[in-house]
Every structure is written in structure tokens, then in C-alpha cells.
Image: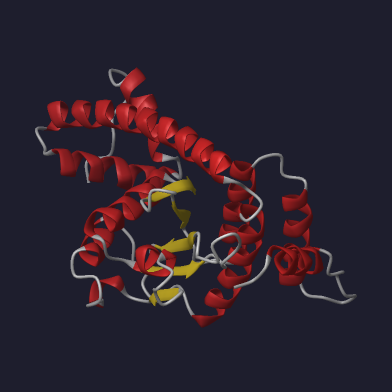
């Protein structure tokens, strides 16, 4: 097991590596990310900065999220780029199968990639659900072990709407991004992680409330099921490039003035 001294030494060496002259744009992006993470005021801010970098450095990543394992052994999503990513993660936690669950597990494969979820036998319950949510490919990689347990803290996940959009080159980039995130997470203690989980839980509850209101409006207006109403919200969110919760909030507040596409 890596000692605390060795961990701190390796972390300092990693973050202090100078940028060589003539490096390409990807190397410059990683150098900028390192500087950004060193000045991030909170762990939540660190995770969000890594997710922003992920969507830039992995072009096929339409959605990204973090999976962390809490002190109680339960999975949760402390940061993501959209509500659909939360739903994709939550389905994995519920079914006990999927790429982020496998990668986050210390006994798992560390990396899980599925180029085409429509033809993916490893996750018989989760893969069809992901396809219904508009996702065609997925890539997850474990966060690197850190003290005091030496266990994986979780995983960094990316989802692509198109099949065959994520490849082996994206895996290497995601591994480096996960390393950046791991170094930041390793500096936190159990209290910080608990606060992060509680803050995200409050945000998730607020989002679910307003999404529930919007779904109810669509169900009443169109006579559709809850699942069909959510699908209308999801498709419209993607078409308008607006976060699902923001769209739901607007619909709930102004439903007498606006309508959603009927396709």
C-alpha cells in the first residue's frame, strides 16, 4: 500500500511537472487544468472543473459525471454535466450493473468501455435503459487509489449520444483526467465528502421536484405516461441545448404561455 509520504511526494511531482516547449493543444489543456485545480476553493469546484475539461478534451463526451463511494459503501453522483447523466448513474446504482459501478468497484476492471450500447450483453438491464435515455456509447475509468485505504474512491464517466463515438484514445485522456480528480479528492477527509454529498442531494431533490411538476403538466396536457412525459422533456432539452432542470423550471412557471414539440 502506498504510504502517505509517498503519496504526497508523487502528487507534488505530478502537479509540478513543467510544460515543455512545443507541446500540443492537449498538453496545454492539461497544464491549464492543473493550474485551475490548484486554485479551486472547494472539492465540488474541483470536480466541476474536471468535468468541464472532460467535455472539451473528449469531443464525443456529450455528458460526464463522477461516481463516488461513500463511507457507507453506497454509490452517489456528486457532480455531473446534466440531469440525464444523473439518471444514467442512478439506474446503474439501482440495477447493480453498468460501467461506472464496475469501474468504481476496487475489485472491478478499472476501465469499462462500450462503443455500442444497443449491442451490449454485459449489462442486460442497464444498457437498454441507457439507449432509451438517448445514449449510444459509454466510457468509465476508476479514480486512482489514495490514502488512507488504498481503495478506489469511484469513477469518472462519459456518455456519448452516438454509437462508436468513444474509442481507445479517449480512454487514455480520461485516465489522465481521472488522475487529476483523484489527486484533489485524496486531499479531502470524510467530513468534506459528506458535505459534498449532502449539498448534491439537496440540489438533486430540488431538480426532481421541478422535473416532477413539468412531467405532471405534460401528462395532463397530452394524456401520456410519466415515462413518455420525461422523454418529451429529455428530447426537448437536447434539441434546445438547455439543461433539463432549467427547461422543467421554465415549463412549470410558464406552462400557459409555452408548449413543447410534439414529435
Is the image coloured rainbow, by chain, by secondary structure, or in one colour? secondary structure
| Quadrant of the image containing the N terminus | bottom right
Residue 107 position within the rendered picture, expressed as x and y whole percent measured from the top left: 40, 73
Seen at 75% across and 71% down, the residue is: 27
Above or below, 165 relative to 228: below
> Visible in this render: residue 246?
no
> Visible in this render: residue 127?
yes
Residue 221 position within the rendered picture, expressed as x and y whole percent measured from the top left: 15, 27
Residue 143 position within the rendered picture, expressed as x and y whole percent measured from the top left: 54, 65
Above or below, 258 relative to 112: above
Q: In this orientation, which residue lies closer to the viewer: 157 or 232?
A: 157
Task: Residue 108: name its quadrant.
Answer: bottom left
Point out the residue furthest to the right here. 21
Seen at 40% across and 68% down, the residue is: 138
Q: Is residue 182 left or right of residue 153?
A: right
Seen at 64% across and 48% down, the residue is: 46
Point out the residue furthest to the bottom here. 168
Above or below, 219 relative to 148: above
How many marks are shown on the rendered structure? 0
Q: Is residue 16 left or right of residue 64?
A: right
Residue 141 position within the rendered picture, expressed as x and y whole percent measured from the top left: 49, 69
Q: In this orientation, which residue lies closer to the viewer: 261 or 104?
A: 104
Seen at 41% across and 74% down, the residue is: 112
Amino acid at each position: 500500500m502506498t504510504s502517505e509520504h509517498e503519496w504526497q511526494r508523487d502528487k507534488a511531482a505530478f502537479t509540478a511537472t513543467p510544460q515543455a516547449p512545443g507541446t500540443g493543444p492537449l498538453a496545454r489543456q492539461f497544464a491549464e487544468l492543473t493550474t485551475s485545480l490548484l486554485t479551486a476553493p472547494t472539492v465540488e469546484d474541483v470536480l466541476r472543473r474536471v468535468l468541464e475539461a472532460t467535455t472539451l478534451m473528449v469531443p464525443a463526451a456529450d455528458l460526464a459525471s463522477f461516481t463516488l463511494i461513500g463511507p457507507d459503501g453506497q454509490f452517489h453522483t456528486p457532480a455531473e454535466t446534466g440531469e440525464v447523466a444523473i439518471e444514467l448513474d442512478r439506474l446503474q446504482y439501482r440495477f447493480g450493473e453498468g460501467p461506472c459501478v464496475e469501474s468504481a468497484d476496487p475489485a472491478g476492471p478499472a476501465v469499462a468501455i462500450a462503443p455500442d450500447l444497443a449491442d451490449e450483453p454485459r449489462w442486460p438491464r442497464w444498457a437498454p435503459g441507457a439507449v432509451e435515455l438517448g445514449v449510444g456509447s459509454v466510457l468509465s475509468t476508476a479514480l486512482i487509489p489514495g490514502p488512507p485505504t488504498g481503495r478506489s474512491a469511484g469513477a469518472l464517466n462519459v456518455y456519448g449520444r452516438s454509437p462508436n463515438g468513444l474509442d481507445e484514445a479517449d480512454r487514455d485522456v480520461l485516465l489522465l483526467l481521472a488522475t487529476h480528480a483523484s489527486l484533489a479528492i485524496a486531499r479531502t477527509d470524510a467530513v468534506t465528502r459528506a458535505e459534498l454529498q449532502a449539498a448534491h442531494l439537496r440540489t438533486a431533490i430540488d431538480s426532481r421536484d421541478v422535473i416532477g411538476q413539468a412531467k405532471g403538466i405534460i401528462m395532463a396536457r397530452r394524456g401520456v405516461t410519466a415515462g413518455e412525459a420525461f422523454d418529451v422533456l429529455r428530447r426537448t432539452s437536447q434539441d434546445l441545448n438547455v439543461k433539463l432542470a432549467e427547461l422543467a423550471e421554465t415549463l412549470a412557471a410558464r406552462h400557459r404561455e409555452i408548449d413543447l414539440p410534439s414529435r
